[in-house]
């Protein structure tokens, strides 16, 4: 079985499809291969549309993850794809595949979490479909809004641009480790669990970068920096050099490290952990000064630069250069996130 | 467990949602409770957006239904919701949950069928998400296009309007009976299997009814006439009287009836069978003469009328009146379609 990206390419070749690379189609500017598609709206606005799946046993463990988190996160991660275009999430449609045994209390708690995310994002449910399934599977279609022509794709990075990330990477992976180690109900660890269970979506930052035309390319880090940086570089036809010492990594309390079953490596979690839903974006050098006005500027870190070619390189703290292979999370990968 | 309609109401109450009943929201005119939502596009056009789930063991049996049919039908039925608004399907996004064991030949055959439907509908894949799942589950987001303000909802039927259906009802149910009786590979039965395996979508008719403003309300018959008529009446706040003798029912060859394990009742299949994807629509009397110009007019049948009140009544051939209860297909119902 190939990985997810290869599978998507395979599907796109088999079915009449549109990637937007070859120009517009009925005013539609962007299709397969980015975080979301863009269709023209009225009054100088565009709509962006994305879908995101959230499956029991793959994205969450029904006996470990609180239903509230499942509802919250399923919507937050789908909305993050819209934020990664620089758009404001506005509406969503929900496909809910549910076993009969989950249609009572579990459903109500899940909906409570989803409602919380919807309120936090200012987004409304406008349609959907429900069906009975053996395992829980949700698919969320999120529709966002942005000024015409401002959507930030993955494909605009140019050599010389600087690369930035928001937040600290690996926090969600640390939270997952805690859940896998059965610490999900430990009240003293709630702040460490939160980035995994109730991730923040960087709507304000994404929208600012788009409306001020500061970022040349952008993607949300859903599957890990190594994988999503490779996607951004591939879409832009560029390479990248990032410095290990610059990456803002999760802080793992010493006392906690001892309680976990195996060694957690903050830099590995930051590079390959995924689910952080932070933004990774490139900024042309001449626009860097403007970045200081970004909301949450103090949360932004420059981690490297875009270079010509195809190679994505990691520069170690001792100056050694190594190819950074995409080893982030893949729902079809083998050596990926622990599954139930 | 309540039925699907109750479940949807439950979800819509639990989450900030928008039905369109209370007016517009950011130019959006229609949300939960219709076949699709409508968002404003540019140049006097609107976009309609719908999602539709298609699940192994619920909507299809993986050991009985050809993968080509699964791919074709999953897209056709989603596009039918767009046709039922009077819009032209244009783009789609695919969420594909797939077990590893289905990622080879099964996937390729499924995609072949989906590509066939995409070409027939003139619709392109523009995005999606893939994930590993225990059972196959697909969710299709279809985006269609229509002139601003022309979308036909479920809620515009008025007492006195006449009710029409396209095609013959129960054909898909007969095809399902054949599949359940292991006749899916019988070449002599292909024409009877086709409406179930490769359903036609009434795009041209729906678009004509919308652009000529002939229909006051419309829905596609996906879950059975009894269920979908009840939905149209409920959304419109009206009742209906339909005549059993007028309903265009599937023709069951005598020789075939003997080969099936149990008695098939054409009128019951037509009323409750579902999956026909024919259009059910109401037409104000003054616009009935115009209907003669509809594409496929000879395929249309007047089956009754809209009346004041809430009751949906079936008038028997002998003149007796009975309430027509929604006994069509429900993915959460008990006495519904046979499941694997």
Image (cartoon, coloured by chain):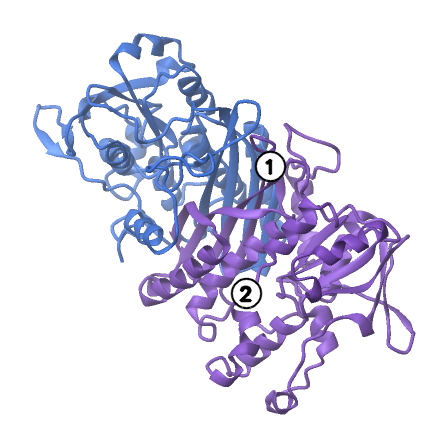
Chain colours: A purple, B blue
Which residue carries the number 1 mark?
A46
Is B309 drawn above or below residue A199 in the view shown? above
* In the displayed structure image, the side of residue A307 where residue B213 appears, left or right: left
Residue displayed at 62% across by 42% down: A37
Pick the residue in front: B143 or B38.
B38
Which residue carries the number 2 mark?
A59
Instruction: Please report, as a chain letter, where disc 1 is located.
Output: A
Q: Indicate the secondary structure of the residue bearing disc 1.
A: strand
Is A201 drawn above or below residue B94 in the view shown? below
Q: Indicate the secondary structure of the residue bearing disc 2.
A: loop
Q: Quadrant of the N terminus of chain B?
A: bottom left
Residue displayed at 44% across by 74% down: A63
Q: Quadrant of the C terminus of chain B?
A: bottom left
Q: In this orientation, does residue B171 appear?
A: yes
Q: Quadrant of residue B222?
A: top left
Pick the residue in front: A321 or A158.
A158
**How far from the left and from the top, in percent, is residue A69?**
47, 67
Instruction: Please report, as a chain letter, where disc 2 is located.
Output: A
Asked if badges 1 and 2 are on one and the same chain, I answer yes
**How far from the left and from the top, in percent, is residue A1?**
67, 59
**Dot 1 or dot 2, earlier in sequence:** 1
């Amino acid at each position: 079985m190939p990985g997810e990206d290869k599978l998507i390419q395979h599907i796109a070749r088999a079915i009449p499809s549109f990637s937007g690379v070859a120009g517009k189609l009925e005013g539609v500017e962007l299709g397969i291969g980015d975080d979301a598609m863009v269709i023209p709206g009225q009054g100088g606005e565009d709509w962006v549309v994305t879908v995101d799946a959230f499956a029991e046993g793959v994205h969450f463990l029904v006996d470990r993850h609180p239903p509230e988190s499942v509802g919250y996160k399923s919507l937050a991660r789908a909305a993050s794809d819209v934020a990664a275009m620089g758009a404001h999430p506005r509406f969503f449609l929900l496909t809910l595949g549910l076993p009969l045994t989950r249609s009572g209390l579990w459903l109500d708690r899940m909906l409570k979490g989803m409602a919380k995310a919807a309120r936090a994002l200012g987004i409304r449910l406008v349609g959907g479909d429900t069906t009975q399934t053996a395992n829980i599977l949700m698919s969320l279609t999120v529709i966002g809004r942005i000024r015409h022509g401002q959507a930030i794709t993955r494909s605009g990075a140019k050599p010389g641009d600087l690369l930035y990330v928001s937040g600290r990477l690996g926090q969600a992976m640390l939270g997952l480790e805690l859940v896998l180690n059965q610490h999900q109900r430990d009240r003293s660890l709630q702040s460490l669990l939160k980035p995994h269970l109730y991730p923040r979506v960087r709507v304000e930052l994404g929208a600012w970068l788009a409306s001020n035309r500061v970022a040349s390319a952008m993607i949300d880090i859903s599957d890990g920096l190594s994988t999503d940086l490779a996607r951004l570089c591939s879409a832009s036809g560029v390479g990248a050099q990032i410095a290990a010492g610059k990456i803002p990594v999760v802080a793992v309390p010493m006392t906690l490290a001892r309680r976990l079953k195996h060694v957690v490596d903050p830099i590995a979690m930051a590079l390959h952990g995924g689910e952080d839903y932070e933004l990774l974006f490139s900024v042309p050098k001449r626009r860097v000064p403007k970045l200081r006005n970004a909301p949450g500027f103090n949360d932004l870190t420059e981690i490297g630069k875009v270079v010509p070619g195809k190679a994505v390189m990691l520069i170690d703290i001792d100056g050694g250069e190594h190819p950074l292979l995409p080893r982030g999370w893949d729902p079809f990968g083998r050596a990926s996130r622990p599954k139930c």
